[in-house]
Amino acid sequence: MIIQLQILGEIVLAMVLGGIIGFEREAADKPAGLRTHMLVAGSAAMLTGLGGVMVTQLGIDQSVINADPIRIIEAVITGITFLGAGTIIRHRGSENKIEGLTTAASLLLAAALGVAVALEQFVLAVGATAIVLLILHGAKILSERV
């Protein structure tokens, strides 16, 4: 039960960090906002956390199975790329404009935050969140001035 509570705490932290990025995206009126980023970060943390206990919990002899935690991260990334692709919109016409790439990238980063939190890399996850906010907000201000 202690492991479950630890994973639950990691999910909450990942969702808070993802929510911070999602709040910025929602304030910028982008297709994926607060709730989406929170759910992406939380699900990545949960999947990563469950992967860490799965082999032991199922009672499988570890000499029989070769557990590869990288596969969990690959599965998270695959799911997020599908979700991110849904946020990308291409407008045909005189401008041939593409929108949503930054939001798709922020969803990928929210998933990475969830993985980092589940791997107990808390300073990295919080620091990356701060850097992303600087980039998203700072780049917007800079592009408006240029």
Image (cartoon, grey):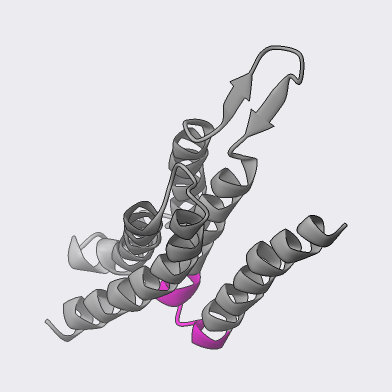
Q: Foreground: 103 or 11?
A: 103
Outermost residue on the left side: it is: 1
**In the picture shown, does residue 88 fall above or below 92?**
below
Q: Quadrant of the N terminus?
A: bottom left
Please state the total of marks drawn on the protein image: 0
Q: Tell me where residue 106 appears, x and y as whole percent.
A: 56, 55
Q: Tell me where residue 8 appears, x and y as whole percent.
A: 23, 75
Q: Is residue 138 magenta?
A: no
Residue at the image point whose x is 72% and y is 69% from the top:
138
Q: Position of 78 compared to 135: left or right?
A: left
Q: Foreground: 101 or 3?
A: 101
**In the picture shown, does residue 121 fall above or below 75?**
below
**In the picture shown, does residue 74 fall above or below 54?**
above
Q: Tell me where residue 112 appears, x and y as whole percent.
A: 52, 62
**In the picture shown, does residue 105 fall above or below 126?**
above
Q: Position of 103 compared to 54: left or right?
A: right
Task: Name which quarter of the figure residue 60 lies in.
Answer: bottom left
- What range is drawn magenta here? 115-123
Outermost residue on the front side: it is: 145
Outermost residue on the top side: it is: 93
Residue at the image point whose x is 27% and y is 62% from the top:
54
Residue at the image point whose x is 51% and y is 39% from the top:
84
Q: Tell me where residue 11 appears, x and y as whole percent.
A: 30, 71
